[in-house]
Every structure is written in C-alpha cells, then in structure tokens.
Amino acid sequence: MKSSPWKKPEGCDIFVTATGNEDVITAEHMAAMKPMSIVCYIGHF
C-alpha cells in the first residue's frame, strides 16, 4: 500500500499515525522533517 501524497512537513514538530499500516511515514518523509521532530507510530494494538 502506498502512502497518500502530502506536502513537505515545513514547520511541523510532531507527526502521529494510528493506522497500523506500513509506509504511512516513510524515510523520505523523515528526511524532510525538522531536526528533533517527534514521530509517534501507534500502530495496531
């Protein structure tokens, strides 16, 4: 499953996903994030 297209995360500090799906936030997305951004992957529980 491909992630949905989204704009470069300018100015964001916190990224949250609760889908449980893979590749919602990819390495490409993380490379565009500000240093010390918080990524919260809740996933499936």
Image (cartoon, rainbow, N blue to C red):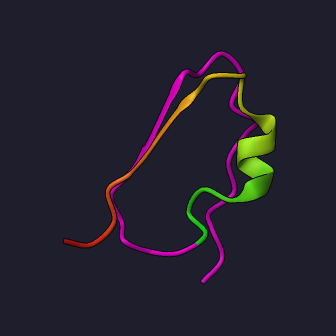
Quadrant showing the C terminus: bottom left
> Which quarter of the figure has residue 43?
bottom left
Whether 41 is drawn above or below 39: the answer is below
> Which quarter of the figure has residue 41?
bottom left
Quadrant showing the N terminus: bottom right
Residue 9 in the image, given as x and y percentages of width and height: 68, 31
Q: Residue at x 80, y 42 (%)?
A: 31
Residue 44 in the image, given as x and y percentages of width and height: 27, 72
Residue at the far top: name it.
Answer: 11
Residue at the far front: name it.
Answer: 36
Residue at the far left: name it.
Answer: 45
Q: Is residue 1 left or right of residue 28?
A: left
Residue in front for this viewpoint, 21 or 6: 21
Examine the structure image and report whether residue 17 is included in the region drawn in magenta.
yes
Whether 10 is drawn above or below 43: the answer is above
Q: Residue at x 59, y 22 (%)?
A: 12
- The magenta span reads 1-22
